[in-house]
Amino acid sequence: MMFSSPNGWPGSTGSCPQSATFARMLQVSNLSVHFGDRFLFDSITFQVGEQERIGLAGRNGAGKSTLLKIIAGTHTNFEGQVQVPKEYSIGYLKQELDSASDKSVREETATAFDELKALQQRVDDLTDQIAQHHDYQSDDYAQLVDELTHVSHRVELFGADKADKQLEKVLTGLGFSHAQLDQPLKIFSGGWQMRVELAKLLLQQPDLLLLDEPTNHLDIESIIWLEGFLQDYPGSIMLVSHDKRLLDNLTLRTIEIELGKMYDYKANYSKYIEQRAERREKLMAEKKNQDRQIKHTEQLIDKFRAKANKAAFAQSLIKKLDKIDRIEIDDVDSEGMKLQFPEPPRSGRVVVEVHNLHKSYGDNHVLRGIDFSCEKGEKIAFVGKNGEGKTTLGKILAGQEKYQRGEVKLGHNVALGYFAQHQAELMAGDDTILETVENKATGDMRAKVRSLLGAFLFSGDDVYKKTKVLSGGEKARLALAVLLLDPINLLILDEPTNHLDMVSKDILKQAIQAYAGTVIIVSHDREFLDGLTDKVYEFKGGHLKEYLGDIEYFLSKIKVESLDDLKGQQKTQEKVADGPSDNKLSYEARKERDRQERKLKNRVSKLERQISEQEAKLKEMEAEIHQPDFYDKAKDPTKIFNEYNQQKQQLEQLMEEWTSAQLELEGLVES
């Protein structure tokens, strides 16, 4: 959904044309949202500059999605101001779809260009008005020229002459095949329809892009493509995501919402976590001192309240106590939290074997004669584009899906547990957490229900919560606990992190790493899979391809193939006539070249991150220097200018290193 707001949203003060410096800056001032006595936001203030990349952080329910809705204009029940510049466009990707379109995928996506047509008409109107204007010194003339410049820039961003090619590039990048582009949108699942909504926003290129969990319905290849697209995005981005890798590679600023307050970090997600830990440590020390002072004051009040000659003093202490801004700290943290799977029963060496397996849905041949096996204790990842058969094979192994031909055989003493994507959503009844587990426990496990719930982070009065009020992450943990009521030594997990926040994902990952049984995981979460599995199986065209390593090894192997696919395999067809082909190189030579290539790619990526950080640092210094009161406030302007010049020299040096590394990499790839 895209909005263009020249006058601001309800509750805002409208546009802010004070100066050219701030003309393209969205500002949020003293924003408050409360439900009864509870504040979701308590007078928070921040601004979004041009081409900023901002990640929103905070526990589930902190208000991240609500903040995006307020900025987008779809949530108007708030106090404070949202100041939106004139002719400023905002695009918002929400988590739910309104309804399916009757148009084809291509036709629905092409509606993104409706604004382009309106912009082109506006360019014509403005050009006519300027041609008829003769007072070149007037404010009206200057405003017309400014608007024409901005609107023309918007038209240029759309790339009107390349609109059709850009449409296909974005849709195929998000996973659609060319054959699917002319199929009716309504025959696709909600996840694929959400991809069309995302494609429309990317094609519209609004000044500010608001993305709420954009990778929820994407496969790994599409996530990587989206990450690259957003890195080159010309506007600003505010992002809510549980994909740590995406946040780290894309953002340079993190806004945390905690207990109604906002904390602004000039850092990506990983660096924010480090800085947040330092802030919390300092805050806990301050809170300890404050608690000591409050306790001492309360003791004095109790001591003097009953004495007539000290009553006035006691009242002044009470007023002083009431005015204290009490320090609050969110008590949810990963330290000390640990999820533990029960010890699995022993199984045979071969856990499962699949031979010549065929599975079709009508004319759609999902699995074509595949062979697959896994052994005791292995941890395996199933990856690939959506619809390639990952979930289908998981269901077949779990005995929940039939197949046409082939053989599926479980090994000796194998006890299988299956966690499906929708299982967490089924945890929504009137039973409490404790009742849900007790009703499903049998035999010896009935006496261990409390211990099991404790292992899955449900303790104390939490066990009496009704399941229908649980968060998505809590439901997912409860579903896993129920799954493990019976002893299991083969665990199949289909998208287990979909409803989990960052902390819960880390806890689950540690539990799987410590689990002695066999695990098969269907997931698109790169950070979650990193270092977790021994093997990766790629599903493609009805077949499986085995990679002996974790997700990083797999991604490094398919990177060139993926790039070739996206570029029409042009590079594969371009051979250097006098150079040896890759096939003729020895195994050792190919291995050494791959190692050098990975090293150079890592070097280029690192330099690109350093350059982005350096440019952001210079931008901050420039903003400070250009302030009207800079020379009044600065203690030593000369020192600041010297530091600025040093930072510029450092940027130039980084650029030279990047150019050298990039040229070396290109030479290696082409050799």
Image (tube, helix red, strand yellow):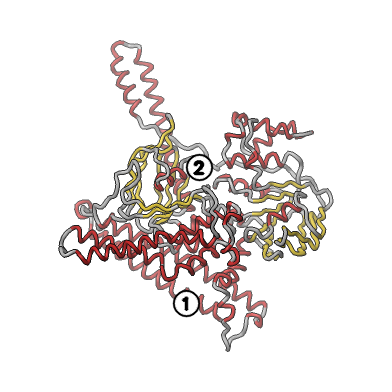
The image quadrant that residue 567 belongs to is bottom right
Q: Secondary structure at mark 2?
A: loop
**In the image, 350: left or right of 181?**
right
Amino acid type of disc 1? Leu
Residue 44 image position (x, y, % from top left): 37, 41
Query: Badge 2, how many Cα within 10 Å: few under 14, some, many 20+?
Result: some
Residue 424 image position (x, y, % from top left): 63, 42
Q: Residue furthest bottom?
A: 578
Q: Is residue 224 visible?
A: no
The image quadrant that residue 471 belongs to is top right
Measure the C-alpha gap from mark 2 to mark 1.
Answer: 43 Å
Q: Are marks 2 and 1 in contact (CB under 8 Å)?
A: no
Q: In the rendered structure, which disc, 2 or 1, sits on the residue that comes first in sequence?
A: 2
Query: Badge 1, how many Cα within 10 Å: few under 14, some, many 20+?
Result: few
Q: Is residue 529 above or below residue 668?
A: above
**In the image, 346: left or right of 621?**
right
Pointer 1: what residue?
A: 663
Mark number for residue 237?
none
Q: Residue furthest front?
A: 102
Mark number for residue 59?
2
Query: Residue 468 versus residue 9: which sits nearer the camera?
Result: 9
Residue 261 image position (x, y, % from top left): 40, 40
Q: Secondary structure at mark 1?
A: helix
